[in-house]
Image (cartoon, rainbow, N blue to C red):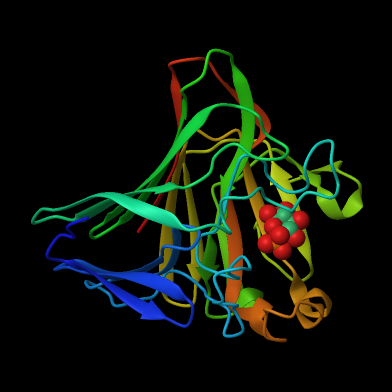
Amino acid sequence: MHLCNTASLLPQDDIEMLIIDNEHAHATISLFGAHILSFTPKHDKVQRLWLSKNALLDGKHPIRGGIPICWPWFGAHATNAELSSHGYVRNQNWHIVDCQDTEQCTKISLRPGITTGLGFDGQAQLTMIITVGAELRIQLVTENTGDSAFTYTGALHTYFHVDDINDCELTGLTGEYLDKLQDFKRFDTPTPYRFNQETDRVHLATPKELAITSGNHLTHIESAGHDSIVVWNPWSEKSVSMQDMEDDGFQKMLCVETAVTLGQQVLPGQSHTLEQVIR
Ligand SMILES: O=P(O)(O)OC[C@H]1O[C@@H](O)[C@H](O)[C@@H](O)[C@@H]1O
């Protein structure tokens, strides 16, 4: 695969890292999981993503932070509790199928080796298209290459960097959410939406635009193709219990996930795109 001028491959620990450095931004993408680890636009030099200092970069375990891809299921598998959380593409190697650069951006397409596995028997081709420019565009395209329809769930499970979780606000969400910490009971979205405890919520509203205010920074998030927005912060006790998260890591991150939690059917010959844009 010939890489374009603004992309280079660099081994780090046990993973091949794709470094994108163009006129507009710097980004790092792990080929293990097609997992974006960092994105810094050059116009303000503010890192938009959070990556755990204790993230395991061993090419075996999912990476804590950045943008994990959850597919072909989100969270626990619907019928088999033994299967790994969030599916099986975040812990396999992906390969680059295309790399192009223009004056505005660098565009990379990646595919995983395996798309059919225990827990999902759909015949699918999965392509992650990452466009790095003044904004970061992530498109996860699920194509049905078989003869029968399948349904998948998934998410672009983005860990956003915040200066201080106690002093940040999420705007753009309204309506009810299902609280995963309280047996999926329904509650109204708080206004203002701020954080002072463990949070694990599935919002069934599908606003196109959200924003995180943190210190003097505003991060814009655009979503498409989703049926939910998931908001997650493990807070202190859970952070301490997680091997790949530093004890106070929760203070610097907020997951706002563009997700399909109800299920998206894809008919033979058709495709579905889950998209998130960050700026
Ligand atoms: O530890 P994992 O598998 O990466 O998942 C992290 C979190 O991901 C969120 O999307 C889920 O709603 C949480 O329930 C989960 O704890």
Q: Nearer the viewer, residue 193 or 269?
A: 269
Residue 58 horizontal/vertical position (percent):
56, 76
**Residue 208 placement, left or right of 179:** left
Image position of 92 with respect to 179: above or below: below
Residue 118 horizontal/vertical position (percent):
71, 40
Residue in the image at 67% along x and 85% along y: 246
Quarter in which the N terminus is drawn: bottom left
Image position of 62 with respect to 249: above or below: above
Image position of 253 with respect to 145: above or below: below
- Does residue 189 show up? no
Indicate the quadrant of ligand 1 in the picture: bottom right
The number of numbered badges drawn on the structure is 0
**Residue 209 placement, left or right of 200:** left
Residue in the image at 47% along x and 83% along y: 13
Residue in the image at 65% along x and 58% along y: 193
Residue 16 horizontal/vertical position (percent):
39, 71
Residue 172 horizontal/vertical position (percent):
54, 47
Q: Nearer the viewer, residue 200 or 71?
A: 71
**Residue 71 placement, left or right of 128:** right
Q: Quadrant of residue 279?
A: bottom left
Q: Residue furthest left?
A: 103
Q: Quadrant of residue 143?
A: top left
**Residue 269 placement, left or right of 238:** left
Residue in the image at 56% along x and 50% along y: 89
- Does residue 120 show up? yes
Q: Nearer the viewer, residue 5 or 121?
A: 121
